[in-house]
Amino acid sequence: MDQNPINKRCVYSLPEFAEMMGRHRSWAYRQVSEGRIKVITGFGKAMIPAAEVDRILNLSKTQTIKS
């Protein structure tokens, strides 16, 4: 079975990623410069693979907040 449904994109721009996360685009650029997010470069704009977005979202599900 195809792991990438037809309605799901393969890559996102940094501003799109920031919007999905509810953050300002400068936050996304800072995450890249600090090495927290892997990007694809060399084809024009830097792009964040959908698998990297999924990795980040799964990270947030595994952490618990202590009060």
Image: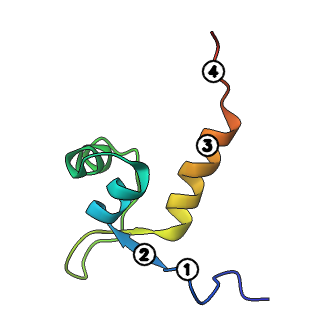
Q: CA separation, marks 4 and 3?
A: 13 Å
The numbered disc on residue 11 is: 2
Q: Residues within 10 Å of mark 2 (few under 14, many from 20)?
A: some
45 horizontally vs 62: left or right: left
Q: Which residue is mark 4?
A: 65
Q: CA separation, marks 3 and 2?
A: 19 Å
| Image position of 67 with respect to 55: above or below | above
| Image position of 56 with respect to 41: above or below | above
Query: Is disc 4 in contact with disc 3, using a CB cutoff of under 8 Å?
Result: no
Image coords of residue 36 (percent x, y)? 40, 44
Sooner in the amino-acid sequence: mark 4 or mark 2: 2
Callout 2 secondary element = strand
The residue closer to the viewer here, 8 or 10, is 8
Q: Which residue is mark 3?
A: 59
Q: Nearer the viewer, mark 2 or mark 1?
A: 1
Callout 4 secondary element = loop
Query: Is disc 3 in contact with disc 1, using a CB cutoff of under 8 Å?
Result: no
The numbered disc on residue 31 is: none
